[in-house]
């Protein structure tokens, strides 16, 4: 009860096939193979062979493989939350291993302190390219920080790494995703604060590269709601 319905061929006794063999005699050495072939054909015809139960790695109902497009969507959501200053939402998108290393409180505090140090008013990001490597994905992106004291700070060619988890794609996050070694996320203050540097790196042409995350204000950051 409760199992799958039995096919008519499963109810046939083995004697039936033995009788067929006696009625249509063949050399003894071929009898076994003919009976086996008949059984396989009958079971295949009525769906008796379940390919999902033959020991596949994913079991009878394997989990669908995650796609690179899904990784890009997670990265877009993560970067948009950064532009919106929604650090709690960003935290939910980092990997379980990263959450074990960094608490939500430490994660949020790190982003808030960086915003204060930069006198950040807003930021914008754009994804340049994406590449899948087995169970990981690497997305290259640019970020531009708009600040009160330093003007526009460009940090180009960053890499955001994602990994497959039971929750789906998640960001393999570390503090380097804020302060990239060799990046311009934490510049030295200008010699004369009255004359801040407007661009610390030359503007790069972005023709043909769609902007994935629009210019957004950072709630709670310096100068929020003001136009300079």
Image (cartoon, rainbow, N blue to C red):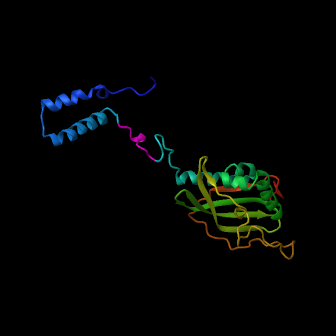
Q: Locate residue 67 relative to residue 50 in the image: left or right.
A: right
Report the number of discs: 0
Outermost residue on the front side: it is 28
Q: Locate residue 7 relative to residue 117 in the image: left or right.
A: left
Identify the residue at image location x=68%, y=63%: 143
Q: Locate residue 22 relative to residue 81 in the image: left or right.
A: left
The spot of residue 49 in percent (x, y) is 35, 37
User: Please, is residue 153 above or below residue 227 in the view?
Assistant: below
Identify the residue at image location x=46%, y=40%: 60
Identify the residue at image location x=52%, y=52%: 67
Q: Is residue 88 on the magenta stretch?
A: no
State the image quarter where residue 107 is shown: bottom right
State the image quarter where residue 195 is shown: bottom right
The spot of residue 91 in percent (x, y) is 71, 51
Q: Locate residue 156 relative to residue 226 in the image: left or right.
A: left
Identify the residue at image location x=82%, y=53%: 220
The spot of residue 176 in percent (x, y) is 71, 64
Chief SS of the magenta region: loop
Q: Looking at the image, which is closer to me, 137 or 225?
A: 137
Q: Looking at the image, which is closer to me, 147 or 109?
A: 109
Q: Looking at the image, which is closer to me, 164 or 224?
A: 164
Q: What's the magenta region?
A: 49-56
Q: Is residue 53 on the magenta stretch?
A: yes
Please indicate, yes or no, whether residue 208 appears anywhere in the rendered image: yes
The spot of residue 222 in percent (x, y) is 84, 58
């Amino acid at each position: 009860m409760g199992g799958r319905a039995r096919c008519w061929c499963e109810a046939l006794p083995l004697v039936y096939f033995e009788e067929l063999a006696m009625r249509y005699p063949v050399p003894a050495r071929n009898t076994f193979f003919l009976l086996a072939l008949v059984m396989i054909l009958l079971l295949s015809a009525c769906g008796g062979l379940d390919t999902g139960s033959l020991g596949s790695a994913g079991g009878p109902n394997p989990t669908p493989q995650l796609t690179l497009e899904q990784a890009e969507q997670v990265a877009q959501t993560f970067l948009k939350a950064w532009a919106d200053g929604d650090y709690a939402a960003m935290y939910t998108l980092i990997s379980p291993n990263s959450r074990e290393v960094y608490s939500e409180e430490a994660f949020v505090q790190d982003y808030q302190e960086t915003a204060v140090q930069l006198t950040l008013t807003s930021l914008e990001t754009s994804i340049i390219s994406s590449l899948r490597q087995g169970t990981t994905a690497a997305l290259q992106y640019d970020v531009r920080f708009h600040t009160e004291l330093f003007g526009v700070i460009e940090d180009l060619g960053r890499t955001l790494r994602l990994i497959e988890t039971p929750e789906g794609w998640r960001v393999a996050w570390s503090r380097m995703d804020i302060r990239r070694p060799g990046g311009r996320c934490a510049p030295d203050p200008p010699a004369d604060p009255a004359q801040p540097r407007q661009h610390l790196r030359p503007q790069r042409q972005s023709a043909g590269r769609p902007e994935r995350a629009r210019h957004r204000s950072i709630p709670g950051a310096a100068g929020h709601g003001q136009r300079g």
